[in-house]
Amino acid sequence: MESKVNRKKFVRYKEGAELYSICQSKFEKLAKEAKAIYKVDKVVLVNCELFEKYLETFRIDG
């Protein structure tokens, strides 16, 4: 994974889906559940830090 220095804090849906290797509809759904969505006029951005924090709740220890 890229170093945190070079990573964007906000991404659009398409870029986020590619970044996390999941389909765009699933990324949108998870981002909404994570409350990581920001809407500026007609542009929707996802906060990657909040998204990743939410994603960690699905971690399986084993």
Image: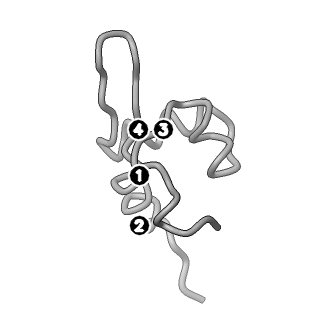
Question: In the figure, is residue 16 to the left or right of 8?
Answer: right
- Callout 2: few (<14), some (14-19), or many (20+) C-alpha neighbours within 10 Å? few
Q: Residue at x 30, y 30 (%)?
A: 38
Residue at the spot of label 2: 57
Which residue is tagged 4?
A: 46
**Sequence-first tag of 3 and 4:** 3
Question: Which of label 3 and label 2 is nearer to you?
Answer: 3
Q: Amino acid at mark 2?
A: Thr
Q: Are marks 3 and 4 in contact (CB under 8 Å)?
A: yes
Q: Residue furthest top?
A: 42
| Image spot of residue 60 (x, y percent) | 55, 77
Indicate the secondary structure of the residue bearing disc 3. strand
Alpha-carbon distance for marks 3 and 1? 11 Å
- Say if mark 1 contacts mark 2, CB within 8 Å: no
Query: What amino acid does circle 1 point to?
Result: Phe
Instruction: For the residues labelled 3 and 2, say whether their Cβ atoms are less than 8 Å apart.
Output: no
Name which of mark 3 and mark 1 comes first in the sequence. 3
Quick one: quadrant of the N terminus? bottom right
Q: Describe residue 57's horizontal placement relative to residue 1 as left or right.
A: left
**8 or 13: nearer the viewer:** 8
Give the residue type at disc 3: Val
- Alpha carbons under labels 1 and 4: distance apart: 7 Å
Mark positioned earlier in the residue sequence (3 or 2): 3
Residue bearing mark 1: 51
Instruction: Please tell me which residue lies in front, 14 or 7.
Output: 7
Residue 12: x and y, percent? 50, 31
Circle 3 sits on which residue?
Answer: 11
**Category of crowding for the residue at label 1, using alpha-carbon neighbours closer than 10 angstroms: few (below 14), some (14–19), many (at least 20):** many
Real-space Cα separation, disc 3 to disc 4, in angstroms: 5 Å
Q: Earlier in the sequence, mark 4 or mark 2?
A: 4
